[in-house]
Amino acid sequence: MPKAITWVISLLGIGYTIALTLVIVGCTVDNEYWLLFLLAPYVITPTMTVFIRPDSEDQDFWLQFAFFMITMSSVSAFAMPLVFWSNGGIAASGLGYGLGASFTLYAFMAGGMYFAYADLD
């Protein structure tokens, strides 16, 4: 069985590859580049995991900050395409590419987080 870090890196790599491809295709299909704003939550979410430590207490500021930022990034990754679409910034195909990119990336991130914190011994 591969080590947990191998699973994490592989799943994140696959998720980012698919998500970035969908974002780029979504931008070029409509010739509207609003979906590039999705890159911010895509970068912030995994970056905040450095503040999550096994010996952290629930009242630690950095742990609370990390979960707050992860939650806000996750919500905005799914809300941004809907806002862009409802305001006429992107067409329905762009909405599909944006939501598909967010769903794919966060699904692969969830798999990576499972292996990061699972006890595989």
Image (cartoon, rainbow, N blue to C red):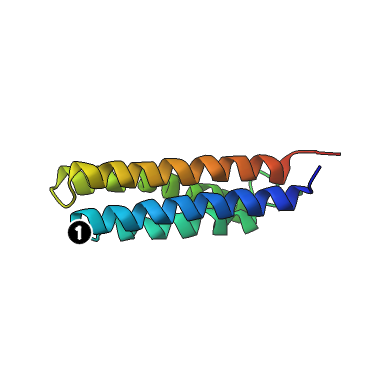
Q: Residue at x 66, y 39 (%)?
A: 114
Looking at this view, is 15 or 58 the one in front?
15
Residue 67 location (% of width, % of height)? 54, 47
Q: Which image quadrant is residue 39 in?
A: bottom left
Q: Is residue 43 left or right of residue 38?
A: right
**Mark 1 crowd level (few <14, some 14–19, many ≥20, 10 Å Cα):** some
- Can you name the residue that lies furthest to the right here? 121
Residue 34 location (% of width, % of height)? 25, 58
Image quarter of the C terminus: top right
The secondary element bearing badge 1 is classed as loop
The residue carrying mark 1 is 32
Residue 8 location (% of width, % of height)? 66, 50
Q: Is residue 114 left or right of residue 72?
A: right
Q: Is residue 23 left or right of residue 119?
A: left
Q: Residue at x 42, y 56 (%)?
A: 20
Q: Is residue 30 above or below residue 104?
A: below
Residue 121, visible in the rendered structure = yes
Give the residue type at disc 1: Glu
Q: Residue at x 81, y 42 (%)?
A: 1
- Can you name the residue that lies furthest to the left here? 88
